[in-house]
Image (cartoon, rainbow, N blue to C red):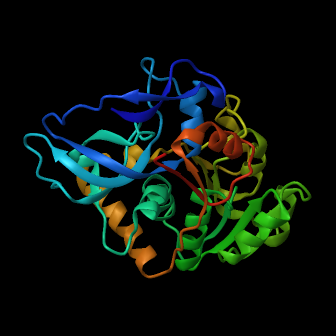
Amino acid sequence: MVRVVKVHAYGGPDVLRVEDYDVGDPGPGQARIRQTAMGLNYIDTYHRTGLYPQPSFPFIPGSEGAGVVTAIGPDVTEVQVGDRVGYTVSLGGYAEERLVVANQLVQLPSGIDDRTAAAIMLKGMTAEYLVRRTYPVTKDTVLLWHAAAGGVGQIATQWAKHLGATVIATVGSPEKAELAKSNGCTHVINYRTENFTQRVKELTDGKGVDVVYDSVGRDTFPGSLDCLKPRGLWVSFGQSSGALEPMMLAVLAQKGSLFATRPTLFHYIASRADLLTSANALFDVIGKSAVKIAIDQTYPLSRVADAHRDLEGRKTTGSTVLLPG
């Protein structure tokens, strides 16, 4: 028996219950992993509250982790017992040990430690597809990134700067502003003390930005649209401040023939080839020190409710990792 975190009903952090669990042996195409670190992501709160409904109760939340393969089932060719691996999948990460479909596992290079891997598989590959594929960022790109001090934000803004872009960032405190500046953001806006839409227009001489990356949702809409130049792209990839109200498509025309997309990582890594390409691109920029990973908080698995409270209370920066215990 190992310890896992289960959710038996939607609700606040108190619904996260640490329980004993029999993982079982891996079946065909599966591998069993002894986890050394587990990532904490905002999407985990959406699963916990039911904003993203789950098919049944109880379920084990958690979307990324790292550890060592301890057993493999029949027909597994992607990994071997003893391999260090990382992954991102839809559920099941809050566990000391777990089963994972083997073709969703990525072997970790020697330069990536387990805690870093647990912090980057979801957030880092999210940053990868956003800046390289949803909108291919170049040296000519001027972009706005909301919540730049968060886990995805820190990785993505460093990556965008590495690609030569002009990066305008929003944050919620002076401390987070300093953090964003240290990550290479060209301009930083404290949305609690400044009107970010007005400030973006000032910084771009009234032109607006090419693309807005928005994981905040309700609090930044429709202001994000007003930051775009004509035919700019609004990338809505989260809603930490609450779900967006329904939007009439005519708004996009009124504000400059804008484009809008609501992407999700799992559509960008659906094939194993895409998964490996994304992961290897991420490992490459980290290996070059173009992107540095900040694990600013760690919690034992037994304190997962506290981790969720701090995440939702915007008390965290960078990445947060859960550890066995």
Q: At 63% across and 44% down in the image, what residue appears? A: 307
Left/right placement of residue 231 relative to residue 60 reads right
Q: Which of 228 and 113 is in front in this view?
A: 113
Residue 294 in the image: above or below residue 248: below
What residue occupies the far left of the structure in this picture?
75
Give coordinates of residue 132: x percent, y percent. 45, 64
- Please state if 172 lies on the left or on the right of 22 as rendered: right
Image vertical order of residue 17 relative to residue 8, above or below: below
Q: Which residue is drawn at 57% across and 24% down?
A: 50
Estimate the x, y position of residue 260 in percent, counting from the top left.
59, 46
Q: Which of 262 and 68 is in front in this view?
A: 68
Q: Residue furthest right?
A: 193
**Where's the N terminus, which quadrant?**
top left
Q: Quadrant of residue 169?
A: bottom right
Question: Is residue 87 depicted above or below 18 in this figure?
Answer: below
Residue drawn at 45 percent across, 52 percent down = 122
Q: For residue 261, what is the image quadrant?
A: top right
Residue 269 at least partly seen: no
Does 321 appear above or below 139? above
Q: Work out whether residue 125 or residue 14 is closer to the camera in this orientation and state it.
A: 14
Task: Give the percent coordinates (x, y) of residue 12.
Answer: 66, 27
Q: In which quarter of the image is residue 154?
A: bottom right
Is 236 or 288 nearer to us in this picture?
Answer: 288
